[in-house]
């Protein structure tokens, strides 16, 4: 697959990843490499990755605990301290080898350590390949509120080696699929139809779809890297999705919802709201709900949960002047940003989701 080269960084695929990484290490003046992993990627990905890296530089591993609940400033403090203890300097390079938690947190640590050192993302989950590792969003959660602290800072390169997916559990694959479905819904019906095909979870046919999904995202970032307008469309399904995810994260009695699972619900709710506010076709709305619930099943959200979830919307990062700004759809491939939505319509959307 051809590398995606932008004015700021490049995204390389499969064997090209290692040629490009080794060439970068050869021509750059890095002092030392720090690979940030979590316990899973340390076990399942680190050895495979290192087997392809050719360098005489000293390499240190920093392991963080796996899971969204560890995407916190406390974990960052641990990593900053480890970097300091291991004498990382401004010429050190951080390589984030992991899923979205590792690439978000590792990118933030790199962007802030000694006012910023260079970093490379090596996503190992489908979600990180098609979304989290691309476009330079870095950060951590604040208590259970998602991604409240962070900066946009582009990595040196992103290396997408889809062989890492062979060790990924099915629910994590589905979580990544949600972001691909989102790219389809905001970009074109053709891609929505391609991405919703369940057979794509078969790793054989997946590479091209991953590539196309990244192109959709990167083309948006090229136009609006700092999310002034167009990049907001990438938050389709995330306004309620993040609120639902935060709500479930904050309650130990609730089942563990992966990011993509929460976004999948958020997309069904956003399509319903779109059908009421933006003339989005009722037929498509029903079809999307059926397709998404066929892939993700249906999570029970009790009526008693609606108000606390709606309350969490006030922390959404797209809010401006006290308004919650939804991304809705006028049609598949025609997103509309900065839409205001009455709470009563959100409650109706939850009811539609359960109907
Ligand atoms: N995950 C949405 C974005 O990177 O803008």
Image (tube, helix red, strand yellow):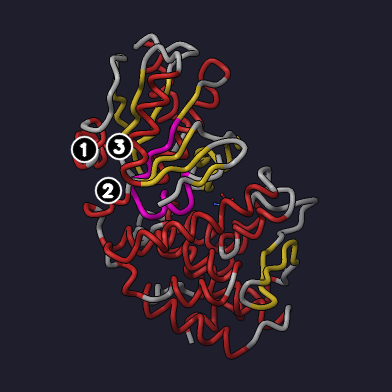
Kindly state the secondary structure of the residue where label 3 is placed. strand
Q: Which residues are magenta?
A: 120-133
Q: Nearer the viewer, residue 33 or 306?
A: 33
User: What distance separates the C-alpha of mark 3 from that of mark 1?
Assistant: 15 Å
User: Ligand 1: does it lie within 8 Å of the C-beta at label 2?
Assistant: no
Q: Earlier in the sequence, mark 3 or mark 2?
A: 3
Kindly state the secondary structure of the residue where label 1 is placed. helix
Give x and y (percent) for residue 334: 68, 72
User: Ligand 1: does it lie within 8 Å of the C-beta at label 3?
Assistant: no
Give the mark toward the camera: 3 or 1: 1
Q: Which residue is mark 2?
A: 164
User: What distance separates the C-alpha of mark 3 from that of mark 2?
Assistant: 14 Å
Q: Which residue is mark 1?
A: 48
Quadrant in which residue 74 is drawn: top left
Q: Which residue is mark 3?
A: 38
At a point 40% along the width and 11% down the height, the residue shown is 31
Question: Mark 2 packing: few (<14 Cα in 10 Å), some, or many (20+)?
Answer: many
User: What distance separates the C-alpha of mark 2 from that of mark 1?
Assistant: 9 Å
């Amino acid at each position: 697959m051809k590398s995606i080269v932008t004015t700021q960084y490049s995204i390389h695929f499969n064997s090209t990843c290692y040629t490009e990484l080794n060439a970068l290490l050869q021509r750059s003046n890095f002092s030392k490499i720090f690979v940030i992993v979590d316990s899973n990627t340390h076990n399942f990905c680190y050895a495979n990755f290192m087997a392809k890296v050719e360098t005489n530089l000293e390499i240190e591993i920093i392991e963080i605990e796996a899971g969204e609940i560890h995407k916190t400033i406390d974990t960052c403090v641990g990593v900053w301290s480890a970097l300091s203890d291991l004498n990382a300097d401004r010429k050190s390079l951080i390589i984030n080898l992991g899923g979205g938690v590792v690439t978000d947190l590792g990118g933030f640590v790199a962007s802030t350590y000694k006012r910023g050192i260079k970093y490379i993302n090596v996503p190992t989950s489908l979600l990180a390949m098609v979304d989290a590792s691309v476009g330079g969003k870095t950060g951590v959660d604040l208590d259970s509120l998602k991604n409240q602290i962070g900066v946009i800072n582009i990595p040196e390169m992103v290396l997408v080696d889809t062989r890492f997916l062979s060790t990924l559990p099915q629910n994590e694959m589905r979580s990544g699929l949600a972001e691909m479905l989102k790219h389809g819904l905001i970009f074109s019906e053709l891609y929505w139809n391609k991405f919703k095909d369940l057979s794509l979870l078969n790793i054989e046919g997946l590479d091209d779809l991953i590539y196309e999904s990244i192109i959709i995202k990167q083309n948006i970032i090229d136009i609006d890297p700092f999310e002034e307008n167009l990049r907001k469309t990438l938050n389709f399904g995330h306004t309620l999705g993040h609120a639902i995810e935060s709500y479930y994260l904050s309650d130990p009695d609730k089942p563990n919802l992966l990011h993509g699972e929460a976004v999948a619900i958020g997309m069904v709710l956003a399509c319903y709201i779109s059908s009421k506010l933006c003339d989005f076709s009722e037929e498509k709305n029903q079809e999307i709900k059926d397709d998404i619930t066929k892939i993700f099943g249906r999570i029970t959200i009790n009526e008693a949960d609606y108000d606390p979830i709606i309350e969490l919307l006030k922390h959404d990062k797209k809010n401006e002047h006290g308004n919650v700004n939804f991304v809705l759809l006028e049609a598949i491939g025609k997103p509309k940003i900065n839409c205001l939505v009455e709470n009563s319509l959100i409650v109706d959307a939850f009811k539609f989701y359960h109907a």
